[in-house]
Image: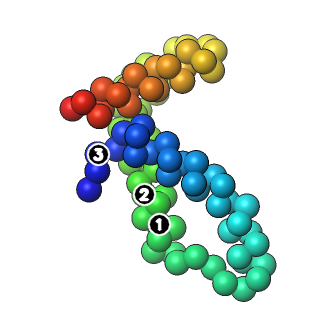
Amino acid sequence: MLPMTQATCAPRLRSMASRSSSLTTHRASGSSPSKRQLYKERHLIECCFSKLKQFRRVATRYEKTARNHLGIVTLAATILRLR
C-alpha cells in the first residue's frame, strides 16, 4: 500500500470530486457503485487528512490566505512522502 501523500491523495480527491455528480445519476438510474469500493476510497482520503492534521500548523490553519495554507499543506504532504 502506498503511503498517504499529496501525490497519492490529490488525484483520488479529484477523481472522487468529478464522480460526485455522476453518483447521483447512477442512483437515479438504479445502478450504484459498489459500497466496498466507495468505503475503500473514503477510508483512503480520511487517512490522508488524518496524517496531514498531525502537523499542528495544518490542523489549526495559522495561515489566513488560501494560497499560504495550500503551501503549508503541500509542504506537509512532501514531508510525509519523504518519511
Q: Residue at x 76, y 72 (%)?
A: 25
Q: Which of marks 1 and 3 is nearer the N terminus?
A: 3
- Crowdedness near tag 1: few (<14), some (14–19) or many (≥20) residues, C-alpha within 10 Å: few
Relative image position of residue 33 (x, y in whole percent) = 58, 76
Classify mark 2: helix, strand or loop: helix
User: Which residue bears the numbered disc 3?
Assistant: 3
| Residue 10 vertical position relative to residue 21 in the rendered view, above or below | above
What amino acid does circle 1 point to? Tyr
Classify mark 3: helix, strand or loop: loop
Measure the C-alpha gap from mark 2 to mark 1: 6 Å
What amino acid does circle 3 point to? Pro
User: Looking at the image, is mark 2 or mark 3 nearer the viewer?
Assistant: 3
Q: Can residue 40 be seen in this view?
A: yes
The way the protein has been coloured in the rendering is rainbow
Classify residue 76 by image quadrant: top left
User: Which residue bears the numbered disc 2?
Assistant: 43
Relative image position of residue 58 (x, y in whole percent) = 46, 24
Count of marks, rendered view:
3
User: Which residue bears the numbered disc 1?
Assistant: 39
- Crowdedness near tag 2: few (<14), some (14–19) or many (≥20) residues, C-alpha within 10 Å: few
Relative image position of residue 10 (x, y in whole percent) = 49, 42
